[in-house]
Amino acid sequence: MLFPLKKSLAEKILNQICETINKKYDDKLYKVGNANYSEFSLLGVISLDGKLGGAKYIIIGVVNPQFQWFLRNRIYEHVLKIFKENNISIAYPRFFLNDNQ
């Protein structure tokens, strides 16, 4: 489990990320008329240290189907960038490319 201070910081940052995503990608959120029922929000943080199998936090939102994977990837990138800037380490798969031939 996260140290309480880190958990509250992570929750604050994730809420800010949701606000940023909602503003930046407003045109990709699912809307009915002018009503927006789908803004991203933080449901909760369970663990970020990897002891429970990886970073566990839940951000929910509804987007138009054609932007599902695009927005998922942008959110992942944004979370990693902001956490790194705030010195919060999370368990996340690493990718290494070895092109020695």
Image (spheres, rainbow, N blue to C red):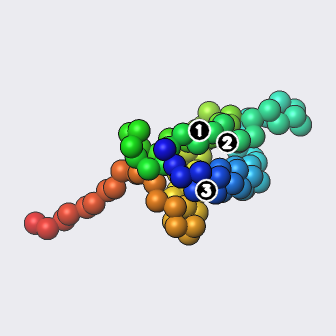
Q: Quadrant of residue 62?
A: top right
**Measured Cα–Cα span from mark 3 to mark 2:** 17 Å
Residue 18 placement (x, y as % from top left): 69, 49
Identify whether 34 is placed above or below 27: above
* Residue that mark 1 sits on: 58
Q: In which quarter of the image is residue 78?
A: bottom right
The mark nearer the N terminus, 3 or 2, is 3
Q: Are marks 3 and 2 in contact (CB under 8 Å)?
A: no
Count of residue discs: 3
Q: Which amino acid does label 3 sit on?
A: Leu
The mark nearer the N terminus, 2 or 1, is 2
Q: Which amino acid does label 2 sit on?
A: Leu
Could you say which disc has been placed on residue 42 in the image?
A: 2
In the picture provided, is 48 more to the left or to the right than 96? Answer: right
Q: Are marks 3 and 1 in contact (CB under 8 Å)?
A: no
**Measured Cα–Cα span from mark 2 to mark 1:** 6 Å
The mark nearer the N terminus, 3 or 1, is 3
The answer to whether one can see residue 4 in this image is yes
Q: Which residue is drawn at 53% across and 52% down?
A: 3
Q: Which residue is drawn at 38% across and 39% down?
A: 53
In the picture provided, is 77 more to the left or to the right than 100? Answer: right
Residue 12 placement (x, y as % from top left): 69, 54
Look at discs 3 and 1 and give the one toward the viewer: 3
In the picture provided, is 31 more to the left or to the right than 89? Answer: right
Element on which disc 2 rests:
strand
Label 1 crowd (10 A; few <14 / some 14-19 / many >=20): few
Q: In which quarter of the image is residue 94?
A: bottom left
* Residue that mark 3 sits on: 5
Identify whether 73 is placed above or below 65: below
Report the front residue among 76 and 12: 12
Report the front residue among 19 and 65: 19
